[in-house]
Image (tube, rainbow, N blue to C red):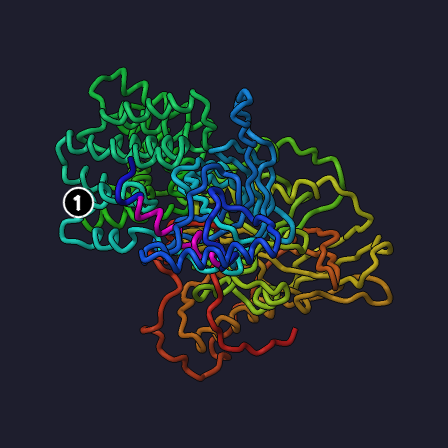
Amino acid sequence: MFSISRVSLLLCLLIITVGCQKGADPSSEKQSSAPTNESAKTDSKETTSSKTETASKSADKEDPKSEEPKPPELPKTVTGNWVLMLPRQQQMMPLYLLKITAPETPKSDEKKPAEKPTAQAVELLAKGADVAPAKILSSKATELTVDFDESLLNDGKEFLRFNFQGKLKTGVILGNISFNGENCTPALLLPTTEADLSRIKEPMPSPGAQELMQAMQSPDPFKQLNEFTQKMSTVPLALDAYPTLVAIALSQKKDEKVLKEILGRYVEAAELWGTRQQIDTLISIGSMLAKSESVSGLASQYLDQAVELIKKGATPLSGWKSDIALAKARVGLKSKDPEQIKSAGKLLQEELKNNTSNREILTELVHYEKTHGSIDKAIDHLGILAGSPLTGHERQLIAASKQNPKLLKYEHPQDTLTALWKEKHGSTEGLDEYLKKSFKRFLQGFVTKEAKSVDLKKGNRVSLVELFTGASCPPCVAADLATGVIEASFPHSKVIVLRYHQHIPAPDPLTNTDSEARFILYNHGGTPSTNLNGQVIPGVAGGVEQVDSSYKQILEALIPTLSETTDVKIDLSAVARDGKLELKANVAGTEKIKEPLRLVAVLAEDELHYKAPNGINIHDMIVRSMLSEPNGFPAVDGKLSLNKTVPLNDFKGRLTDYLSAFEERSGANFTGAPLGLEKLHLVVFVQGELSKDVFQVASVPVSGSIVYKTVNPEKKSEKPKPVKATKPTVKSEKPVEKTKPEVKSEAKPKAKPETKKEKK
C-alpha cells in the first residue's frame, strides 16, 4: 500500500514515460507492460484494417470516456530502456540512457529455476547534456533488480566511478549511487521507449521541492518539516529534510518518544532506496545522536543496526568503519564510567592509525587527552589540525560558536594549541616552527602503501606536475595539498611539482605575468587545473575533505611514468654571486623525438609562508619567473641550451612592478605580499611544441649568496602613490567557502583588464 506522495511521485515521473511513448509511436493506443525500443511488426494491410475497425467501433460508442487514451502500463521487470536520474535539490538531472536486459521468465508449464542475475545486463545508449562520457564496466540484473558499475571519462581516461544499486518498485527502479565507494545518494531509473536523450534534455522538477522550501522558511520549521516528511515520505527530498528535522528536534530537546518516532520514519524512508542507503542513514543518525549531550545513549542501537546489516553482506563504503568508531567513542567519552572513557580513548587511538588525517577523530582525541591523557599528545594532534586548512564544516562551527557561544562551543584549533603551548612552554616561542613540521606530518599522513611500494630505481624519467591555483580559490585546496602529498611521496629525482598562481577568483599576490601566460598556453578555463608531463589530469578540485581522492587521482596517472626510461638528459647549474643569477642548462638525447622541442626554464620559490584566504599557509615551488616566453626557448642549431645571467634586483623588481601595476588597475591591496625570494630553484624541462608532452625535467637549488641590493628611496619616482585605505585587501580571514561538493568543480576566472607584455 503506497501513500499519496508515492502516487504523486509516480505521476510526476511518468511524464517522461508517457511523453516518450507518444513521441515514439503517435498512433499507438496500447502500451506494452515493459518499455522497449522494439515495436511489434505488423502487416500494413492488417494495420489499416485494424485502424478502420477501431474507428468504426469508437463511433458507435456513446461513452466519451472510451475516446481517452489509456495510461501506459507500468513495467513489471527491469527489461527495457531507462533514464538514470540524479535528484539534486530543486531538480532531478537526467544522466544516462540505459538498456537493461533481465533473465527471461520461464513458461508456466516449465519448472522455474533458481533466479540468477544476468551478467553484463546493462548497455549505455546515450548521455545527457553536459554530462561526461562514460562506459559500463560491469553489470548484473534479475527480473526486479539491477546493479552496475560505470566509469566517467575525460579524454578517454576515468576520473570518477560510481556504482548503482536499485530495485523495481511500482514501475520505477529506486536505488542509490555510490561515488568512488566513498558516499551514497538516492537515485532512480525511469522507464522510456526513447533510443536517445535528444528529447529528454532538461532536468525535471523534484517532487516536493516547493513544499520543502516553504517548510524550511516557515516560522515553525519543526512542525512544517515533520508534516512534510510524513506526507512526502517516499520522494527523494524527504532524505534531505530528515537531517534538518532531527537537528531541530535535538536542539529543542524534544521528548525521546517524539524523537524515536521521527527516527523510525527516517530509517523507513531510507530503506525505500536500498540497503546501502539504509545503512548510511543509520550511521548518520548514530553520529548525530552521539554528539548530543542529552540522548547520546540512543546512538548505539542505530549503530548496531548498521553493523548488523553490513554483516549480512552489504559492501561497506570507505568511511563507514571510522564513522561508526567515532560515534561509539563519542558516546563512551560522555559516560561517567572511567573504564568506558578509557575504552573510548583507545578506540579513537586505534582508528587514528588507519585514518591519520581524520580531523574529527583528531578533535575528539584532543578532548580526551586534555582531560584524561597527555597534554603532549593533545598538542601533537592539535599540530595537525592547526597546521592545515580547516574544512568548511569546521569554519561553520567556529562562526556559529562566535555568534552564539551559549548554544555551541567550538574553538579554533590554533587558539587551543596556542593556549596549551603557553601552558607547557610559558610562551609561544617555537610554535611557528612546530606548525611547519606539523603541516609536513599532515601531508605524510595521506601517502599510500602503493606510493611507498614504487621501485624508484626503475626508469630514469623525471615527471613534472604543473598546478594552476589561486590563494583565494576554495576548490584549489584539495589540489594544492594533493600535490604536496605527491612531493611527500617521491623525491625530486623522480617528481617535480610547479605551482602557477592566478587572480582567480580574487587578486593573488603570488601571481605574475609568466604564471598567467602559462595558464593561457594550456588554454585552461579555471582553477585548479593540473597537468602531468604536459597533459591534463581531471578531478583534483575540492576542499580538505577531497585531498585523499585528489591525491589518488594524480597518483594513478603518475605511477606508470615513474618506471619509464628516456634518452633525454638535462645538465644544469644555478649560482648566485655578486648580485646576479648565473643559470646554465644543456640538453642531450633528443634525436629520436619527431617534433619541434622547446627548453622551458623556470625560477621557483620554495617553502614560502603566506596565510592565503583559502587556508593554505605554506606554499612550495611557486613559479616566480620564466626565463623566456611561456613555451620556452627554441633549439639553436639543433641544440637546446641555456646560458643566462639575471641581475637579482631585476628579477625581484619585475615582480614588484607587476604587483604595483595590478594594484593600480584592480584596486587590490598587496601590502605585506611575500617577496623574500630567498629559497630559489632552477627548473628546466624539455617540452614538445605541438603535443605539449614533457619528455624530461630537472631541478637544482640556487647555490651561493642571494642578496638583493636596497634601493635608495631618493632615487624612487617622486610621483606619490594614491591612498589605498579603501581598497580591498587580499588577506581575508573569511574566504568564500565551497558548499557541499558534488562532482568536483573549478573556480572560473573573472574578467581581467589587459596587461602589457613586459620585455624579458
Q: Is 188 left or right of 193, judged from the image as shown?
A: left
Q: Compared to 308, does 556 lie above or below?
A: below
Q: Which one is nearer the viewer's eye here, 84 or 529?
A: 84
Residue 57 horizontal side relative to residue 132, left or right: left
At horizontal 68% and vertical 68% (from top left) the residue drawn is: 628
Position in image of residue 12 (x %, y %): 35, 52
Query: Per the image, is 731 magenta?
Result: no
| Vertical side of 628 occupied by 397: above or below | above
What residue lies at 63% left-to-right and 59% top-to-bottom? 603
Q: Closer to the camera, 747 or 182?
A: 182
Magenta highlight on residue 13: yes
- Give amino acid for label 1: Phe
Residue stretch rendered in magenta on the structure: 7-22
Q: Residue at x 37, y 66 (%)?
A: 729
| Residue 240: quadrant of the picture | top left
Mark 1 lies on residue: 222
Q: Residue at x 86, y 54 (%)?
A: 592
What secondary structure is marked by label 1?
helix
Compare residues 239 and 192 and report the one nearer the observer: 192
Q: Main secondary structure of the magenta part?
A: helix
**Quadrant occupied by the C terminus:** bottom right
